[in-house]
Amino acid sequence: MNQRFTTELLGDHPALLEISIENESAISAWVRGGEGLIGFGEYKRFVLSGPERFEKARAWWRNELQNFDIENNVLGSGTGPILFSSFAFSETEDSVLIIPNVVIGERKGKSWISWIGNKPQPRLSQISTVKKPLELRWSGSNGVEWQARVSQAIAEIKDNSLEKVVLARFIDCEVTPQISAQRILQNLAAEYPATWIFSNNGLVGATPELLVRLSKSLVTSRILAGTIRKTGNDEKDLALAGSLARSSKDLEEHEYAVRSVADVLAPICTSTNVPETPFVLHLANVMHLATDVTGVLADSTSPTDIFELAHKLHPSAAVCGTPTPLAKKAINDIEGISRGRYAGPIGWIDARGDGELGIALRCGQISNDAKSIRLFAGCGIVNGSNPESEYAESQAKLLPMRSALERH
């Protein structure tokens, strides 16, 4: 017997990240600027790995959709059944797909609620605003060792045809009493409203990078590569933004990343738009070189969906390197950590195969008991890189999550 799946419009309600539902503690989220989706609880979860993980994910999602009697009174992208997806960076590690019990959505002043089952519409309430300070104990930040790995990567680039490789690092934090994922998301949203705030099975963060958005046939990807730390002084930061836009090292790194996305989209699109020069994206802690690449998918007998786009685009040069096979090998040989779902595609997919998948950056993985968290950061290494500068950049990229924890 099929499960009933209902989607209805909502009236006024608290902001997405301030909503709670009784007895639904698990949070899945994808929110930017107050708009997006937040899921509560888990109706079903699918953990998968392997080289065909995107194809397996599509097959599982389509099969689950067959088991729903869908009543959608809202319609439009992001309404109806939603799959919160978080794919590992490497095919050898676990990816996690979640169908929540309840999903709340907000877009362009319209809000809606979807839920599974025959019960009446779930009642929403506002979460407590009482903050619970955390005792934080940091470990695992060995700058000397990581800089040595960066030096090794630079030597690899000089010695062979490797052009760029992204190296990641992590720091760990033990927490007392426990982390609230929803509190972390609120803090990130308040300080980084231009980013996509996400949560999936304990992976929480605020990414400025959109791997792919598919809405009907329009494809969009926001590529970031090339970073400089902000000082907090507007005049100095304006000068730094100018230097970033002229930096040959950063422009080279950015060109690799843009090219890796444009080369994938060109054969499957009737038209693409690739700006000639990047813009400078200003965030609270850093500035990035950024380029928005768009395309219109070609009509075909088997339309391209977001699973296929993610498979083709991941890993981009922004999180792996160029050429991809050599960069993957360098990561395996040099990096020395398990990335898990860090730097993998994360976001949501609807019943039509549309959706938004960012790259899981500026994030941390909360432990099952919520008493510890591992934060990740990575930097693109090219011929002109300097180990000390790259380490400083990685420290800046850890700031959003560190600050969100400290303001818990």
Image (tube, grey):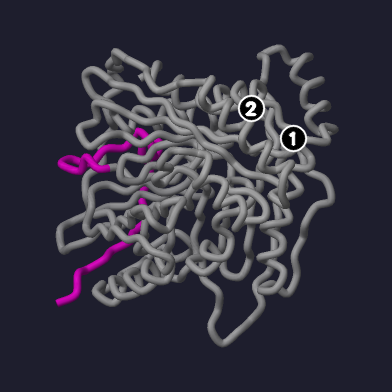
Q: Residue at position x 28%, y 18% from top?
A: 130
- Amino acid type, residue under disc 2 in the picture: Glu
- Looking at the rendering, the stretch of residues picked out in magenta corresponds to 1-26
Can you identify the residue that label 2 sits on? Answer: 390
Q: Residue furthest front?
A: 159
Q: Is residue 180 left or right of residue 267?
A: left
The answer to whether marks 1 and 2 mark residues whose Cβ atoms lie closer than 8 Å is no
- Examine the rendered structure and indicate whether residue 276 appears above or below residue 264: above
Residue 284 visible in the picture: no
Q: Residue at position x 76%, y 48% from top?
A: 255
Mark 2 surroundings: few (<14), some (14-19) or many (≥20) residues within 10 A: many
Residue 47 visible in the picture: yes
Nearest to N terminus: mark 1 or mark 2: 1
Q: Position of residue 312 (x, y in %)?
A: 57, 65
Can you identify the residue that label 1 sits on? Answer: 280
- Examine the rendered structure and indicate whether residue 285 appears above or below residue 317: above
Pick the residue in front: 399 or 90. 90
Q: Nearer the viewer, mark 1 or mark 2?
A: 2
Q: Position of residue 160 (x, y in %)?
A: 71, 49
Dot 2: what SS? helix
Q: Is residue 372 left or right of residue 149?
A: left
Quarter of the image where the C terminus is located: top left
Pick the residue in front: 354 or 246. 246
Q: CA distance from mark 1 to mark 2?
A: 19 Å
Q: Is residue 341 left or right of residue 39?
A: right
Dot 1: what SS? strand
Disc sitting over residue 215 in the figure: none
Q: Residue at position x 71%, y 64% from top?
A: 263
Q: Position of residue 200 (x, y in %)?
A: 35, 46
